Amino acid sequence: MADETRVVDAGAWRDAVAGARDEGFTFFDWLSAVDRTYDESAPGLDVVTHLLDTSTPGALRGMLLVTRVADGEALDSVTGVFAGAAWHERETHEMFGLEFDGFDDGTGLGTRPLLLPDGFEGTPLRKSFQLAARASKPW
């Protein structure tokens, strides 16, 4: 299976995800980010989601949607398009520090911690995050 990849503007993110769903990509697989802070042309985070079209037996189609979000900017949540995106958006928020506008998982509690222990400070999947092992031992 070769996935189709579409790169979309951050302002069109939610609409692009909804459009892909309407085209038959109705199975939400995952959403995450890639830290591109040191990309000199456009620093920020690449947010990627993987969707599947499972409507034709034996002919699974996949789609990757990608957008670049500038550092400090928020991205529209897709929880209104795919409820299953809530867990992934919480993880991406916690690990990368990305805010999701309109996030709604039905609890009213927002993008609260998901995986890290209480009181943890920092965003461990950002390139700027200092790992404890690297602070105490040169690499």
Image (cartoon, rainbow, N blue to C red):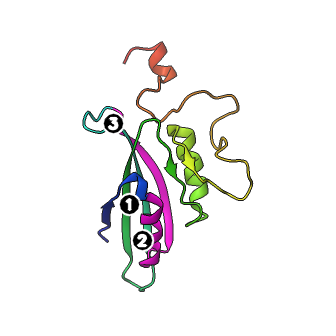
Q: Secondary structure at mark 1?
A: strand
Q: State how far apart marks 2 and 3 are (Cα).
A: 26 Å
Q: Magenta residues?
A: 13-37
Q: Is residue 23 magenta?
A: yes
The 10 Å Cα crowd at callout 2, few under 14, some 14 to 19, many 20 or more, is some
The residue type indicated by label 3 comes to Pro
The residue type indicated by label 1 comes to Leu
Task: Answer with the quarter of the image where residue 19 lies.
Answer: bottom left
Q: Quadrant of the C terminus?
A: top left
Which residue sits at x=65%, y=44%? Answer: 114
Q: Which residue is mark 1?
A: 65
The 10 Å Cα crowd at callout 3, few under 14, some 14 to 19, many 20 or more, is some
Q: Is residue 131 placed above or below 110 in the rendered structure?
A: above
The 10 Å Cα crowd at callout 1, few under 14, some 14 to 19, many 20 or more, is many
Q: Are marks 2 and 1 in contact (CB under 8 Å)?
A: yes
Q: Which residue is mark 2?
A: 20
The residue type indicated by label 2 comes to Ala
Q: Which residue is mark 3?
A: 43
Task: Answer with the quarter of the image where residue 113 lies.
Answer: top right
Which residue sits at x=48%, y=61%? Answer: 14
Which residue sits at x=45%, y=79%? Answer: 54
Ranked by sequence position, the earlier of labels 1 and 3 is 3
Question: How many numbered dots are placed on residues in this image?
Answer: 3
Task: Answer with the quarter of the image where residue 62 lies.
Answer: bottom left
Spot occupied by residue 31 in the image (x, y as percentages of width and height): 48, 55
